[in-house]
Amino acid sequence: MRKFSGDTLLVASHNKGKLEEISELLKPYGITVTSAADHNLPEPEETETTFVGNARIKAHAAAKATGLPALADDSGIEVDCLDGAPGVYTADWSETPNGRDFELAMNRTYQEILKTGSPAPWISRFCATLVLAWPDGHDEVFAGTMEGQVVWPMRGDQGHGYDPIFQPDGYDITFGEMDRWEKNKISHRSDAFAKLVKAFGP
């Protein structure tokens, strides 16, 4: 595995919640995070049908445009009774003419579950795939998951995205009700980062 050397990493994202989470996870390693917005980078079209495919598009586009190592994340929620949907289309389900509306997306997810007639618990998982890309085209891939279930109604106003309807295994509260620092310790992204940090070692 190629090791990361340097003290600044470009995170190829415009999502403020995601940037805060990644910055906090990388802070112990003395790495300063800059964002795609800091470099005025456009968001490339995500045309792949897998998390790793879309993360690669974003990471390589940012690395090529800036000449810096770039980290991209593609993540989403998979619901078993929906055959893994929304999956890579997790953010797409929130799109409206006026921007993203995750309350709308959560409602859609619940309505789609009801259509299946599947009884609770509605087994699901959050997935995160991180791709660390270098300007020469090399990349390393790190995937993480957090198992749990979709619950209804929505609970909590912490976190972001689908957090208010996801209850992780071993807990009786949703990610939306959980202190964000506690969530960061157990999340799908934290799982992926636990694998990524080996790339920052000696």
Image: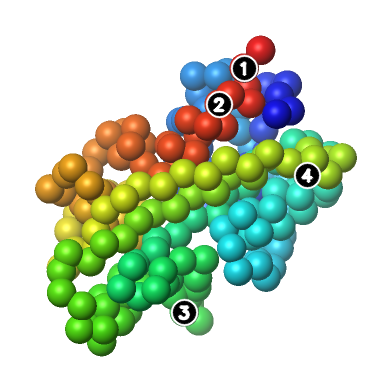
Name the outermost residue toward the top: 202
Q: What residue type is labelled 1?
A: Gly
Q: Quadrant of residue 196?
A: top right
Badge 3 crowding class, 10 Å Cα cut-off, few under 14, some 14 to 19, many 20 or more, is few
Q: Mark 2 points at which residue?
A: 197
| Marks 3/4: CA–CA distance | 30 Å
Front: mark 4 or 2: 2
Say above or below: 175 vs 120. Answer: above
Q: Mark 3 points at which residue?
A: 96
Disc 1, SS: loop
Q: Where is residue 73 in the image (x, y as percent from the top left)?
A: 57, 49
Say above or below: 109 vs 71. Answer: below
Q: Position of residue 195 (x, y in %)?
A: 53, 32
Badge 4 crowding class, 10 Å Cα cut-off, few under 14, some 14 to 19, many 20 or more, is many
Say above or below: 95 vs 35. Answer: below
Say whether residue 115 is left or right of residue 128: left
Q: Name the residue under label 4.
A: 63
The C terminus sits in image quarter: top right
Q: Earlier in the sequence, mark 3 or mark 4?
A: 4
Q: Which amino acid does label 4 sit on?
A: Ala
